[in-house]
Amino acid sequence: MGFLDRSRTVAPPDWNRWLVPPAALSVHLAIGQAYAWSVFKPPLEGALGLSGTQSALPFQLGIVMLGLSAAFGGTLVERNGPRWAMFVSATCFSSGFLISALGAWTGQFWLVVLGYGFVGGIGLGIGYISPVSTLIKWFPDRPGMATGIAIMGFGGGALIASPWSAQMLESFGRDSTGIAQTFLVHGVVYAVFMSVGVLLVRVPAEVVERKIVRSAVNVSARNAVRTPQFWCLWVVLCFNVTAGIGILEKASPMIRDFFAGTAAPVAVGAAAGFVALLSLANMAGRIVWSSTSDLVGRKNVYRVYLGVGALTYLALALAGNASKVLFVVGAMLILSFYGGGFATIPAYLKDLFGTYQVGAIHGRLLTAWSLAGVLGPLIVNAIADSQKAAGKTGPDLYTTSLYIMIALLAVGFAANELVRPVAAKHHEPVLEGASR
């Protein structure tokens, strides 16, 4: 593959390992745009005559493809190296915007779904896992912190993309042509921005990598999915994500509904500010909680995510609309656990399965995100719609959803408690090929 070949990315002896996190960030900050998809929903609905459900299709397909491409592409990422993976991610993610631009310009919404959802979703999945195993190998002493830095970018990408996209739509217009121009600019700019990661990323020299691999348990991706530990963590991730994404997807209307019947209802602008606060909590949780896991251990920090998360949901359910401060702080805490769960899981996998094929194992585990990305919004929206149809208002629209999230987090907590070291029969007997 020439320039993209793994052998061309081996770092020289004096390479500074702190150049690798910025390479990862250049990719994750770009693909983190996915969390800003809601900016495009109203213009697309108005320009193409779509319903809210239809305008969500590109995002939903993108999240599904993220999990599937990460699962099926994980082994290729391990084999071909991070530069190849980042290049594939940049190509697919940027091409997705270009295809979407054509769809918006011609009024063919199926092209937007195909471009942003299918093609761009592949870029999301490959890009998300592309730096994971490389960062863990560069930072064996602080794997939680290292992956937290990169995955923080995915949570924070929307903070850049949301105002930037909104400003372009104001400048170009919110009709089909304006949306197409905005998509086009996104595709070009993200291609350039992600190229920084492609050029900068390096893998540690083989002798160093083998020393790191020999210091830990090593389990192949094929064997990992046969262990109960993998499926316990799959349940943990799925239910932790479900609990967070249910709030994240409906944050703005949710806070307005909660306090609609009070003396001080929440205005549209304040609801938008609430969404920004949740994004900050999501981003901060990825670095703070994952770094904390290096000190207290992965199982303990997941006890916090799942146990304290369940108690926080209980407090929100019982308090109802009695306190805006409690609602905002509680939601931010839950979103910090949501982000922290994403950032800590690669280090948890490394602890259990070693560094041998941790990127491929991580990719397979992200299928839990695909399910959670559908499950969380479905629970919250379906129950809210049914309660609204029954004449309910305020917190009553969401109380049942909150109790369901508590139950899911309790199941996740139990699954985390069942995690034990991987049995020796699943370990790799030969380590000489581990650096490949």
Image (tube, helix red, strand yellow):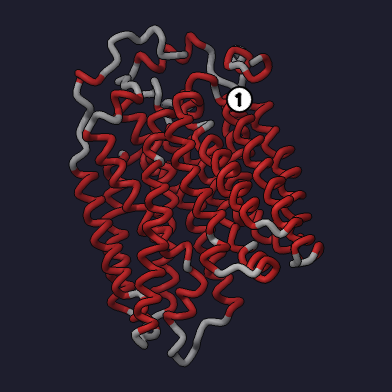
Q: Quadrant of the N terminus?
A: top right
Q: Is residue 426 above or below residue 340?
A: above
Between residue 41 and residue 424, name the one nearer to us: 41
Residue 190 visible at all: yes
Front residue of 85/115: it is 115
Q: Residue at x 45, y 80 (%)?
A: 257
Give the answer, above or below, for where 80 lies relative to 394.
above
- For residue 258, which quarter of the picture? bottom left
Q: Secondary structure at mark 1?
A: helix
When the figure is inspected, residue 226 is found, relative to residue 68, above or below; the finding is: above
Residue occupying the far bottom of the picture: 263
In this rendering, position of residue 408 left or right of residue 360: left
Question: What is the count of numbered marks?
Answer: 1
Position of residue 51 measured from the top left corner of the image (x, y, whole percent) = 56, 69
Q: Quadrant of residue 363?
A: top left
Q: Position of residue 79 (x, y in %)?
A: 49, 19
At x 47%, y 62%, the residue is 248
- The amino acid type found where label 1 is placed reads Arg
Residue 110 percent location from the top left of the image: 61, 54
From the viewer's side, name the closer residue of 67 and 164.
Answer: 67
Relative horizontal placement of residue 342, taking residue 314 as reference (left or right): right
What residue is shown with label 1? 83
Instruction: Give coordinates of residue 365: x percent, y percent.
Output: 37, 38
* Nearer-the-camera pick, 42 or 430: 42
